[in-house]
């Protein structure tokens, strides 16, 4: 979801509530969720907005991972699912705390990380001692596709 204020997501709650998965529906926060692109009358209003957006996702039945992990157990095998708050290179919000999120993860666990911004992988995840096998990200909007040209990167967005 790309939204900055609850009013943008609220009309779609009934649709998102239909998302079901055997092992749960999980989400993490992206850069827009923090309200950094909106002029707020106070820091309290901005924080209230973030808490309302998190509550909306929970109301939809989603498990919002805020620098934490879950264990998905199947047939005496486990997958650690780790979710961090947004962490991005450049001027993007760096609220993600990978060490905190991996507190219950060992280097031997099969671990999947949900991190909104794929730049997190190169900067922090790739060499992390917990040996994360797979990172799932969004943020790129134009899929994970871009063509490098002399003026910069051309993507589908």
Image: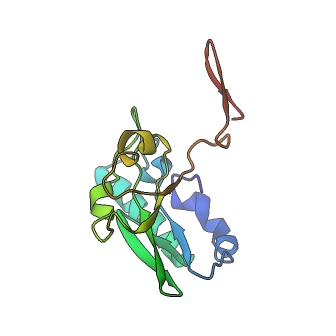
Where is residue 135 shown, x and y percent of the image?
Answer: 50, 54
Q: Quick check: 86 above or below 90? A: below
Q: Residue at x 62, y 82 (%)?
A: 22
Where is residue 90 shown, x and y percent of the image?
Answer: 40, 32
Q: Residue at x 64, y 41 (%)?
A: 144
Where is residue 133 shown, x and y percent of the image?
Answer: 47, 57
Tell me if residue 97 can be seen: no
Q: Quadrant of the C terminus?
A: top right
User: In this view, which residue lies farthest toward the top?
Assistant: 150
Where is residue 37 shown, x and y percent of the image?
Answer: 46, 41
Pick the residue in front: 156 or 147: 147
Q: Residue at x 42, y 65 (%)?
A: 82
Tell me if residue 25 can be seen: yes
Q: Quadrant of the N terminus?
A: bottom right
Pick the residue in front: 73 or 2: 73
Pick the residue in front: 125 or 97: 125
Q: Residue at x 46, y 47 (%)?
A: 31
């Amino acid at each position: 979801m790309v939204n900055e204020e609850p009013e943008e997501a609220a009309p779609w709650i009934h649709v998102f509530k239909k998302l079901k998965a055997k092992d749960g529906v999980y989400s993490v926060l992206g850069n827009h969720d923090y309200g950094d692109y909106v002029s707020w009358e106070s820091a309290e209003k901005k924080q209230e907005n973030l808490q309302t957006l998190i509550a909306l996702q929970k109301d939809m039945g989603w498990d919002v991972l805020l620098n934490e992990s879950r264990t998905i157990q199947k047939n005496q095998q486990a997958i650690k699912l780790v979710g961090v708050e947004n962490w991005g290179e450049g001027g993007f919000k760096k609220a993600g705390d990978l060490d905190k999120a991996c507190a219950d993860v060992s280097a031997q666990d099969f671990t999947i990380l949900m991190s909104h911004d794929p730049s997190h992988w190169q900067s922090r995840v790739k060499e992390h001692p917990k040996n994360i096998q797979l990172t799932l990200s969004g943020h790129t909007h134009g899929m994970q596709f871009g063509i490098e040209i002399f003026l910069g990167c051309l993507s589908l967005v």
